[in-house]
Image: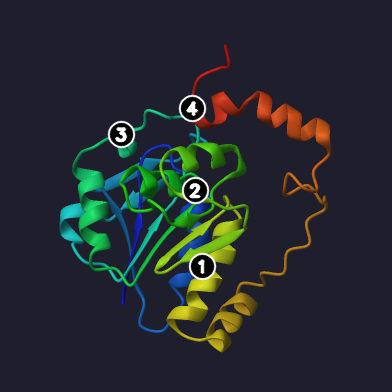
């Protein structure tokens, strides 16, 4: 079973690494980071790079596709028509599961793969997802047929565990969760709009254009 994680400049590292940590531990899994070109890609924090070990033309039919999100680049090349979006559409014809995390869901929607389907994304990009024709839902993990999406960054681990249970079985997924000691007890109850203090939500909304689009609010 081949699991392809798409790697590209400005992606959010945990969106890719979190699912990889889970799915790479499935029996028979062969994980590969795939990029438009081979070599390192710089993540959105600027100092961390992940190596794309294969080109998109070298991975024509993965069983599972995982697309991480990014920050700060609404005009990113992966959102425009071209070889990468062509590849998404081509491999989607063969995948058993097509998955994305956070704004990676926007990438799938831009490729036309989520039209009319329920999907979730980072809360700052929910309106954008709806504009692209998906049915935007406020869930941490959403599934519509073979499409599985996660709300953002850390939710990618939840999504991967959900996938692990579907690909293998619940016992295997639980074993992976235990191996990773994934038992989150964050110091603050501030991981969603529903629980975060209103002033922090307001502050994050105020910088939305910079975080999502890469441009300061006028």
SS category of the residue bearing label 4: helix
Query: In the image, what residue occupies the spot 82% across and 50% down?
Result: 188
SS category of the residue bearing label 1: helix
Image coords of residue 145 (percent x, y)? 42, 69
Q: Is residue 75 above or below residue 56?
A: above
Image coords of residue 111 (percent x, y)? 30, 46
Q: What residue is pinned by disc 4?
A: 213
SS category of the residue bearing label 3: helix
Quick check: 115 left or right of 180? left
Q: Looking at the image, tell me whether mark 1 or mark 2 is earlier in sequence order.
A: 2
Image coords of residue 183 (percent x, y)? 72, 69
Q: What residue is pinned by disc 3?
A: 77
Closer to the observer: label 4 or label 2?
4
Report how far apart the C-alphas of labels 1 and 3 lie in the structure. 26 Å
Q: Is residue 116 above or below residue 196?
A: below
How dense is the environment of label 3, judged by Cα within 10 Å: few (below 14), some, or many (20 and up)? some
- Residue 49's quadrant in the figure? top left
Q: Looking at the image, tell me whether mark 4 or mark 2 is earlier in sequence order.
A: 2
Q: Which residue, as the protein is rendered here, is positioned at the far front?
A: 116
Image coords of residue 42 (percent x, y)? 40, 39
SS category of the residue bearing label 2: helix
Q: What residue is pinned by disc 2?
A: 13
Q: What residue is pinned by disc 1?
A: 160
Q: Is residue 211 above or below residue 188?
A: above
Q: Looking at the image, tell me whether mark 2 or mark 3 is earlier in sequence order.
A: 2
How dense is the environment of label 2, judged by Cα within 10 Å: few (below 14), some, or many (20 and up)? many
Quick check: 26 left or right of 127? left
Tag of residue 129: none
Q: Is residue 55 visible?
A: no
Q: Which residue, as the protein is rendered here, is positioned at the far left?
A: 57
């Amino acid at each position: 079973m081949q699991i392809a994680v798409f790697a590209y400049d400005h992606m959010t590292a945990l969106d890719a690494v979190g699912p990889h940590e889970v799915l790479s531990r499935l029996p028979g899994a062969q994980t590969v980071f795939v990029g438009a070109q081979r070599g390192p890609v710089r993540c959105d924090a600027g100092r961390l790079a992940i190596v794309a070990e294969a080109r998109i033309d070298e991975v024509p039919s993965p069983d599972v596709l995982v697309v991480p999100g990014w920050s700060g680049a609404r005009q990113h090349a992966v959102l425009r028509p071209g070889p990468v979006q062509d590849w998404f559409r081509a491999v989607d014809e063969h995948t058993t599961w097509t998955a994305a995390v956070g704004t990676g869901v926007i990438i799938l929607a831009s490729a036309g793969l989520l039209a009319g389907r329920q999907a979730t994304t980072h809360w700052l990009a929910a309106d954008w997802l709806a504009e692209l024709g998906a049915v935007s839902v406020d869930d941490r993990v959403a599934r519509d047929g073979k499409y599985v999406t996660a709300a953002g960054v850390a939710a990618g681990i939840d999504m991967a565990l959900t996938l692990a249970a579907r690909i293998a079985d619940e016992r295997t997924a639980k074993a992976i969760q235990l191996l990773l000691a994934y038992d989150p007890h964050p110091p603050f109850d501030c991981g969603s709009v529903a629980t975060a203090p209103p002033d922090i939500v307001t502050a994050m909304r105020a910088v939305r254009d910079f975080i999502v689009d890469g441009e300061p609010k006028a």
